[in-house]
Amino acid sequence: MGEATLYGLCGAALVGLGLFGLIVHPQPLRKILAFNLIGGGVFLLFGAIARRGAAAGFGGDPVPQALVITGIVVAFSATALAVALLLRLFQETGQATLHLDG
Amino acid sequence: MSFALDALTILAVSTGAFFFLAGTVGLLRFPDALSRLHALTKADNLGLGLVVLGLLFQPEELFAGLKLVTVWLLTLLAGATVTQLIARTARPGGAQE
Amino acid sequence: MTDRPLALDIGLAFLVLGVAVWTIAARDTFAAVVGFVAFGLLLTLVWARLAAPDVAPTEAAIGSGVTGGLLLGASTRLHGTQTPAPGEKPGAILRLAAAALCTVVSAGLAAIVLLLPEPAPTLAPQAATNISATGLGNPVTAVLMAYRAIDTLLETVVLLLALVGVWSLAPDRVWGGFPGPRHHADPDGLLPFMAQLLVPVGLLVGIYIFWVGSVAPGGEFQGATILAAMWVLAMMAGLVDAPAVSRRWLRLLLVAGPAVFFAIGLAGFAMAGAFLAYPEAYAKLLIVTIEVPVTLSIATMLALLVAGPPERALR
């Protein structure tokens, strides 16, 4: 199961990358992008675990895969709400920033 | 016989990959959005068509081959529509409603 | 899938990480969003390599497609506001500290991946032995609609709540109005013609992917996303206008899926003794009865989430 470990490590690296982007970028839209990157990394971790659970004629354990599908949909709904909030903030204040001073 | 089929597959898929490469070079090197779209659609549709053609040489049941061709046709149609959408906003006059 | 050569996987993993680094490091926000869309499509390839043929189309459609569309629209609207003010950019110390923290987090997760137990615990045998009772042939659909149906029910409710949240962000004067700008179909243009060709074909493909999900890779979320994409395309080509969010039929369409799901769940008390339990003889029928309205509702929710909050007032 070499590829499961490989992509699991890739997922771990993605979580770290996304977390860095989340902390370092001041623009909210970049933070939303980084948040989705973290989500992708977490899903890859699930995928690695699912791949390792291949048994009974299936290529992977179907339960983590179904959880990932649910996770992708929920991540999209969170992103949609976050983007709508950001656009409303832009409409109201004319800037897209979380550091409003005066 | 199967060696000839495999050779044809490799030839067709490699040519398709070359067209994908050409499209990507066009994407990177052309000056503006409209010419990049031109490069992408010409190269990627032909590239995908050649890849599908190469895969058709592999022994599969008829239905699977038909599905591959359908995928290619759908990609053509979807690509053309999305290109129209992008070009509408990218043209020099901007999006004129 | 065992003992496959790893060269392709190593290359793909490096490509995924490279595009992720580009997404984080790009100066221009639009470039970062494009990188993110490419990242999602590369993840689709990774899912195919991980023997997850149901997750791969979901990642391509929802993770990369709809999310990418939403973020591209947002980045276009916010164009010109994305250069950070001098007081906002983090200093070198914060960057170093963040890099150290993220390295620790990644290293911890990598250690967990490398120390996973052998032999790997798995629920696949239990999924396989009970799947004949559900009448389905796709184990992931069986998990989504039978073993963990409560998760799927709550997921549809989460989508609906997100949509309500997005709608509630409309300013008072356009409350209950039409989302998004009005796109006019250019009568001499190619786009309405191509859209008229593509939308029926896309609807057919979406319905097929939903229907085949009971026995082959596919399912309601992938099919619903394609249906939603066709609606969004029709709106953008000017073929139809976005419906006003206060329309009764629209709200019925949105609620129908979760309502039917919940009703059949409650009926499970009477039929088989627990919430969302199916009697064995009718399992497939009940699952399909749930799936059809859920697919329609989710397609509507996804299309409206992309369309956004109302921007034009009701007359």
Image (cartoon, coloured by chain):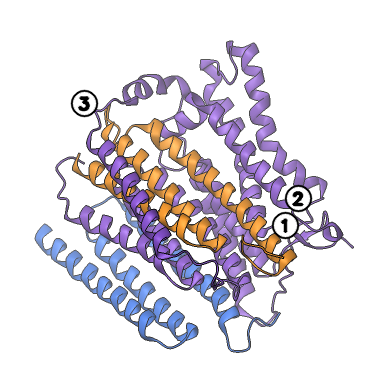
Chain colours: A orange, B blue, C purple
Q: Nearer the viewer, mark 2 or mark 3?
A: 2
Mark 3 crowd level (few <14, some 14–19, many ≥20, 10 Å Cα): few
Q: Is residue B1 visible?
A: no
* Residue A44, percent from left and from top: 36, 45
Q: Confirm or deny contact between disc 1 and disc 2 (CB under 8 A).
A: yes
Q: Earlier in the sequence, mark 2 or mark 3?
A: 3
**Which chain letter matches label 3?**
C
Whole-number angstrom distance, CA of label 2 to CA of label 3: 50 Å
**Helix, strand or loop under label 1:** loop
Q: Quadrant of residue C86?
A: bottom right
Residue that lies at the very extreme toward the front in this rendered image: C93
* Residue A92, percent from left and from top: 74, 64
Q: Quadrant of residue C312?
A: bottom right
Name the residue beneath numbered marker 2: C168
The count of marks equals 3
Residue at the spot 59% in from the left edge and 61% down from the top edge: C199
Q: Which amino acid does the dot numbered 3 rest on?
A: Pro
Identify whether C218 is placed above or below C22: above
Name the residue beneath numbered marker 1: C309
Name the side, left or right, on which B2 lies relative to B43.
left
Name the residue beneath numbered marker 3: C119
Q: Which amino acid does the dot numbered 2 rest on?
A: Ser
**Helix, strand or loop under label 2:** loop
Q: Which amino acid does the dot numbered 1 rest on?
A: Pro
Asked if badge 1 and badge 2 are on a common chain, one would say: yes
* Residue C198, percent from left and from top: 56, 64
